[in-house]
Amino acid sequence: MIDPIPTALTDWHALQTPCYVFDEPELRANFADFGRALRDTWSPLARVAYSVKTNPFPWILRVAREEGCLAEVVSGDEFALALDTGFAANEVIFNGPIKPRDWLAYALASGTVVNLDSVNDVAWTCAWAREHPGRARVGVRANIELDRYCPGETITGDRGGRFGFCYENGELARVIGELRAAGVEVCGLHMHVTTLSRSLRAYEVLAEHAVRIVRENGLALSYVDMGGGYYGGGKRNEGAYERYAKVMADTLREACDPATCALYVEPGGAVVCTPGRYVGKVLDVKDTTADRFVTCELSRINIDHEMKKTSYPLHVLAPDGACKDRDAEGAQGLPAHPHQTLCGFTCMESDRLCSLEGWPALEIGDTVVIDFAGAYSMSFTPGFFIEHAPAVYARDERGACTLLRPLADRRAPRP
């Protein structure tokens, strides 16, 4: 059974729809809890760096900064957004393989945490260092054969990842040597690898390799950046942040001193997924010989960009506020339907969100609330180019919603 929605606290039908609703207390708690877990396990130098690409909505970035986070960016546009929302340049981690040269130079000159990830990064940094002796300090992203140690857990499998410089073939050591020869201080390691499993073992292996790289190259690090890809957030994942922090810290201590070396993590979904909800009304219901099709204001392309999911944690509310979830208290007395397919607003046949087996019959005017929709759903896909972006609300501890971005006027001019 999915968690009950706090219907008594929020008038979901009064919202401009479609919209996203972010639970502000939970969002703040996720940022704060992950940071606290890191500091308690490592040292006060540990920091959470929010992954801006996961959801670049400016209000979320401001909340992250207010909760003591850094901003992790992978483009010049994201860097500019971080600055516009209040982050100082030295509160930004600059990652990614396609850094514009002017932004890279700005970052090097401004105390930004820079993790090099391409041949151009290295060449441009070496050139900048020769023009600015003694000022260039960078980290280097390591590429390791993680699937060898965690078979079946990586996204790429034995094909290997494309990011960073390969440890196994000596390329990473060569790059470190090239940077040093140009007068660049290599003060950090970036160990990010995305996995399917998000397992503790994967982060243990990454930390083990960080220790190995430090020892083999005689590095004196100012930071280790363990990247993102974590589980976490919400009541279902209590203790997850602490478990990740412990497995990384226990290993990294073998070669890094918590008193002088910072520990960075770059969570995205692990902090912003659970506080977000995607909300829209049912627009149409019709029966065919094959099925009952329920069309709503939402779309699968905005919640499942890869079109892989078959179910979502969702709730349905009648206009009078009654909960129409299949297993909700009181729903047993409502007329049920054996099978309904919940569909999105687009004209694609594949825009079918999920099947609802044995749920109360959905009707025009019902409100659909999809949970855990804060990560990527606002940023990863366009609105099919026929709908403007949904409205966005922040929801406080009392259930009151504040409009952060209004729904654009979508009324086409009349012929």
Image: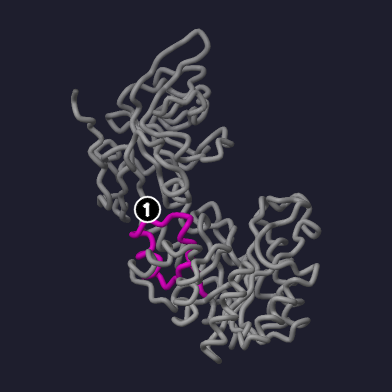
In the picture provided, is 345 more to the left or to the right than 34?
left
Tell me residue 296's x, y (percent): 38, 28
Helix or strand or loop: what does disc 1 sit on? Answer: strand
Residue 360: in magenta span:
no
Q: Nearer the viewer, residue 28 or 114?
A: 114
Q: Nearer the viewer, residue 219 or 288?
A: 219
The residue at 56%/85% (across/down) is 129
Q: Residues within 10 Å of mark 1 (few under 14, many from 20)?
A: many
Residue 49: in magenta span:
yes
Q: Nearer the viewer, residue 113 or 34?
A: 113
On the image, numbered disc 1 is attached to which residue?
A: 23
| Residue type, numbered disc 1 | Asp
The residue at 25%/46% (across/down) is 406
Magenta span covers which residues? 47-72
Q: Is residue 30 above or below residue 317?
A: below
The residue at 37%/64% (across/down) is 81
